[in-house]
Structures are given as structure tokens and as C-alpha cells.
Amino acid sequence: VPDIQATEMVERSDSFAPEGVSFNDLRTLVVDDSQTNRKLLRRLLTSRGHKCDEADDGLVAVEYAKKAIHEGREYDLIVMDYKMPRMDG
């Protein structure tokens, strides 16, 4: 697997999709205790047309995900840090 920078990966995201599937306009949840990381991912994702919500820990993310499911607006993608206070990814 070639070493690809995150921005290149996002720019080429549709090339990884099965035929007939698009990764455009995804509803995403970014979960990280680092505000800088959330900001970076939000900018990267929204620049590609995705909708982006943020949570600063796993417990908040679980509540956001539950609420989204209850409202019929499930997330297409959840990007979560694996080591955070209170609840890890």
C-alpha cells in the first residue's frame, strides 16, 4: 500500500468506492479530545462537501449518534480518536 497523505486520500475518495457508490456529501461525526485535530478534520471534510459534527469525547459521541439515529439522520461516517479521556474510541 503506497504512503498517501490524508488530503490525497480525501481528494481520491471516490476512486476507492465500489461502482455506483459515492463518498460525496457524507454526514460525518469527528470525535477527538484535541480541538486542533477536530478543526483539521472538519476543514478537510467540509472542503470536500461533507457535513461535519464534532464531539470532544466518546460519551458525547455516543449521545450524538443515538440522537441522530432517533431522528432518522444517522451518520455515514464516524472518525474517532482511539485514546481519549472518559471513553476511548
Image (tube, rainbow, N blue to C red):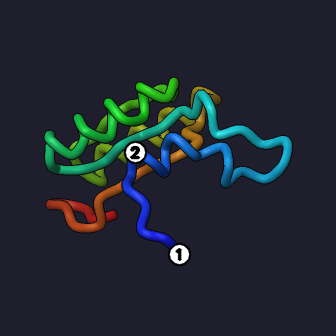
Classed neighbour count for the residue bearing mark 1: other residues with Cα under 10 Å, few (<14), some (14–19), many (≥20): few
Tell me the residue at 19%/61% (across/down): 84
Q: Quadrant of residue 89?
A: bottom left
- Residue lying at the far bottom in this picture: please name it: 1
- Mark 2 in CB contact with mark 1 (< 8 angstroms): no
Q: Quadrant of residue 52?
A: top left
Q: Position of residue 47 (x, y in %)?
A: 42, 26
Q: Which mark is residue 7?
A: 2
Marks 2/1: CA–CA distance: 16 Å
Above or below residue 3? Residue 63 is above
Q: Secondary structure at mark 1?
A: loop
Tell me the residue at 39%/52% (across/down): 6
In the drawing, does residue 44 fall left or right of residue 68? left
Which is nearer the eye, 10 or 50?
10
Q: Position of residue 82 (x, y in %)?
A: 29, 66
Three-letter code, disc 2: Thr
Q: Which mark is residue 80?
A: none
Q: Position of residue 44 (x, y in %)?
A: 37, 35
Q: Which sits earlier in the primary sequence, circle 2 or circle 1?
A: 1
Q: Position of residue 35 (x, y in %)?
A: 15, 40
Tell me the residue at 51%/40% (across/down): 11
Tell me the residue at 54%/32% (across/down): 27
Q: Secondary structure at mark 2?
A: helix
In the drawing, does residue 3 fall left or right of residue 57? right
- Residue lying at the far right in this picture: please name it: 20
Above or below residue 25? Residue 63 is below
Three-letter code, disc 1: Val
Q: Which residue is mark 1?
A: 1
Which is nearer the eye, 53 or 87?
53
Which is nearer the eye, 71 or 44?
44
In the drawing, does residue 32 fall left or right of residue 20? left
